Amino acid sequence: MTKKRRSKKTPDKIFPLVPKNEPGSLVPLETLEPLQQYLAEISRYPLLSREEEETLTKAYYETRDPKLASRIVTANLRLVVKIALDFQKFWMQNFSDLVQEGNIGLMQAVKKFDPYKGVKFSYYSSFWIKAYILKFVMDNWRLVKIGTTQVQRKLFYNLRKEKSRLLALGFEPVPKLISDRLNVPEKDVIDMEQRMGSWELSMDAPVKEGSEDKCLDFFATDETTVEAGVAREEIRASLKGHLAAFKEQLQGKEQIIFEERLLAEEPKTLQELGTVFGVSRERVRQIEARLKKKLRVFLQKRIPDLGSYPEGVEDA
């Protein structure tokens, strides 16, 4: 029987465990079977208020005290179970497997979290939890590791996209054409098509009904690691708050132009806004340029490390 592939880091290697009977301790999952016993155990740990979370995460960030880390982790174990339940339909085996992997993701989140960036820990940690759970599912689905080699991972993330592109261009997406466009061996294309065709889990499906999160959103690709993906979401959440604060300072034409030109998914043209305001297209352009300068100054004051953010962030 093939042994399940687990994350290299296990809970007790990340944070030292304190005795089970000590309040706030982190208990190894192996001692908590069946699942009902584990759920009863984690329900004993009190949740953190927003103020407590901020105090603890800042204290851990500054001191790296394992006891503080343990307190943060145990207060969020129920979050792991909640997220794992969303993925249970993809893993019809031992539910504790998902919980254990999610716990490891939670611990990684504690280690990586920067409490001074204005993002809630629960929001930040959810990406790490989902990433570890889905990586486990990917590694163990039917005991076939779909994304083992670089070529397989490239195909896993791009095969369907490339097929869609070819169909849109009017070409039949045959393996030879796909292999030429992706610069991979034709036999690997055929092999991946067979694997993915027999894999009932739709990676393009939402994690749960009504959710905008898709399974593939939480996997690391060749270009994007889990950490980079989480950091990107962290930046996005932080910027959203800063942009909302900037908008509150605006009035009249500036506020409307900010909403309709810089925030809208489908920005209105300069001419359209000029017609609304009864001014020239050039005048709207001047107001927009002034707004961008004001926004850049505003963000530089609120985000000291703005220069390290991805290109284009300063222009919202």
Image (spheres, rainbow, N blue to C red):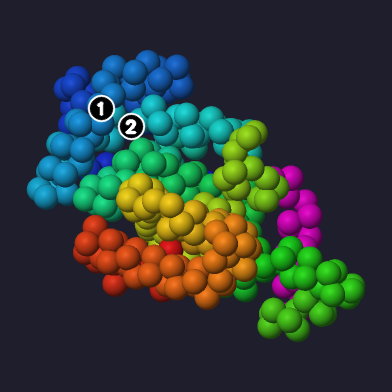
In the depicted view, which residue is nearer to us: 149 or 228? 228
Residue 48, numbered circle: 1
Extreme residue in the front direction = 278
Q: Which residue sits at x=25%, y=26%?
A: 49
- For mark 2, give the secondary structure: loop
Tell me residue 42's x, y (percent): 33, 22
Residue 77, numbered circle: none
Q: Which residue sits at x=11%, y=50%?
A: 62
Quadrant containing the N terminus in the rendered view: top right
- For mark 1, give the secondary structure: loop
Residue type at tag 2: Asn
**Residue 13 horizontal side relative to residue 220, left or right:** left
Tell me residue 216's x, y (percent): 59, 53
Marks 1 and 2, the one that precedes in the sequence? 1
**Residue 179 horizontal side relative to residue 50, left or right:** right
In the depicted view, which residue is nearer to us: 67 or 281? 281
Q: Is residue 5 magenta?
A: no
Q: Main secondary structure of the magenta part?
A: helix
**Residue 50 horizontal side relative to residue 229, left or right:** left
Quadrant in which residue 206 is drawn: top right
- The answer to whether one can see residue 79 in this image is yes
Residue 76, numbered circle: 2
- The answer to whether one can see residue 139 in this image is no
Q: Are marks 1 and 2 in contact (CB under 8 Å)?
A: yes
Give the alpha-carbon distance from disc 1 to disc 2, as whole Å: 8 Å
Q: Which segment is the magenta one?
A: 185-201
Residue type at tag 1: Leu
